[in-house]
Amino acid sequence: MAKLKKFHKLRYVYSDVVSLVNTYCKKGKVLEIGCGTGNNLVFFAENGWDTYGIDINKKAIGYAHKLLKSKNLKAKITIGNVEELPYKNREFDLVLDRACLQHNRINSIKKIIKEVERVLVRGGGIHNCEF
């Protein structure tokens, strides 16, 4: 697992996420790994998705909770390690990675990918949008 750093507050959803969802995805259950301060979670919740997020940074998760609450939105956010996702097999239609994988070492990346495969429904997708 990568070393924990101070979080950066992002204000807007990443444009690739908007394009992906509006072009290719039907509403369903989404998980953002490394969800940080929740800007992408807000987008999914506003658009009717059953929204989940996980991040190891407690302060970032706290900010995400406040952000969602300020907009009267719901998402299930967990403080946790993405190498051991606390979700059932075949639970999510979409997994979003905005910049989680790139901040981990290769051994961790392999574990994370296995976990993502485990929690995705058959035919589900992962969207990886790095910098």
Image (cartoon, grey):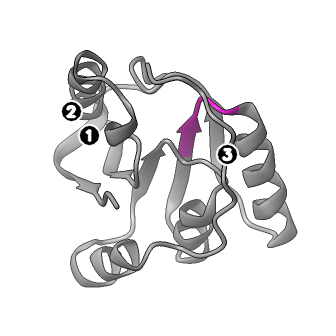
Q: Are marks 2 and 3 in contact (CB under 8 Å)?
A: no
Q: Residues within 10 Å of mark 2 (few under 14, many from 20)?
A: some
- Magenta extent: 53-57
Residue 25: x and y in percent read: 27, 72
> Mark 2 is on which residue type?
Glu
- Between the C-alphas of marks 1 and 3, the distance is 27 Å
> Mark 1 is on which residue type?
Leu
Residue sitting at x 78%, y 38% = 59
Q: Which residue is mark 1?
A: 120
Residue sitting at x 81%, y 69% = 72
Element at label 1: strand
Element at label 3: loop
Foreground disc of the pair 1, 3: 3
Residue sitting at x 51%, y 22% = 81
Q: Residues within 10 Å of mark 1 (few under 14, many from 20)?
A: many
Marking on residue 7: 3
| Quarter holding residue 51 | bottom right
- The numbered mark, 1 or 3, whose residue comes first in the sequence reads 3
Quarter holding the C terminus? bottom left
Residue 58: x and y in percent read: 74, 32
Q: Which residue is mark 2?
A: 117
Residue 30: x and y in percent read: 42, 53
Q: Are marks 2 and 1 in contact (CB under 8 Å)?
A: yes
- Between the C-alphas of marks 2 and 1, the distance is 5 Å
Q: Are marks 1 and 3 in contact (CB under 8 Å)?
A: no
